[in-house]
Image: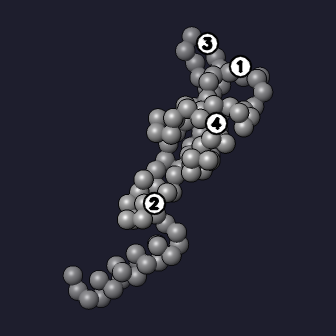
Amino acid sequence: MTTRKASIAAALVAALAAAGVSAARVDICYSEATAPNAAPPTSATVFVCPQAGSRSVAQLAAAGWRVIKMMPVTAGSGGFGVQQQLLIGDDTLFASGFDA
């Protein structure tokens, strides 16, 4: 690698680090299915997440997860219902620089 290419690569890494870009985990969670006209989710609604476990939004936040997006999805298995899909992220990094 030439010196010019190495300096460009180093500058790119430094710019990304300064912008706060880091390795992160994401998880997709779902609430229980409800009737289409049911009340919207509350802070007590429990979401089932493969990595984060079964937790409410408040519990997810306390564990270091942040909500990226929430949206309703149709749930149908012999019936019709709506589940809330929650996309969450965890930007926690260990002191070594590796993600959690």
Quote the CA–CA distance across marks 4 and 1: 20 Å
Of the numbered discs 4 and 1, the one sitting upstream in the chain is: 1
Badges 4 and 1: C-beta atoms under 8 Å apart?
A: no
Q: Which comes before the other along the chain, label 2 or label 1?
A: 1
Q: Which amino acid does label 4 sit on?
A: Ser
Q: Which colour scheme is used?
A: one colour
- Horizontally, residue 1 falls left or right of residue 22, namely left
Mark 3: which secondary structure?
A: loop
Kindly give the residue lying farthest to the top in the view shown. 78
Q: Residue 35 carries which label?
A: 1
> How far apart in space, not on screen, are marks 2 and 1 (Cα)?
39 Å
Q: Is residue 31 left or right of residue 43?
A: left
Relative depth, front residue between 77 and 63: 63
Q: Is mark 2 on a helix, strand or loop?
A: loop
Q: Quick check: 57 above or below 91? A: above
**Answer yes or no: do the residues labelled 4 and 3 have beta carbons within 8 Å?**
no
Asked whether disc 2 touches disc 4, contact meaning CB atoms under 8 Å apart, the reply is no
Disc 4 designates what residue? 56
Residue at image point 59% right, 35% down: 55
Tag 3 residue:
79
Badge 1 amino acid: Ala
Query: What crowding class fits label 1: few (fewer than 14 Cα within 10 Å), some (14-19), or many (20 or more)?
Result: few
Residue with the mark numbered 2: 93
Residue 48 is situated, as x and y percent measured from the top left of the image, at 55, 31
Residue 27 drawn at (x, y percent): 50, 42
Kind of element beneath mark 4: strand
Q: In which quarter of the image is residue 6?
A: bottom left
Q: Distance between the residues labelled 2 and 3?
A: 42 Å
Nearer-N-terminus badge (4/3) = 4
Q: Nearer the viewer, mark 2 or mark 3?
A: 2
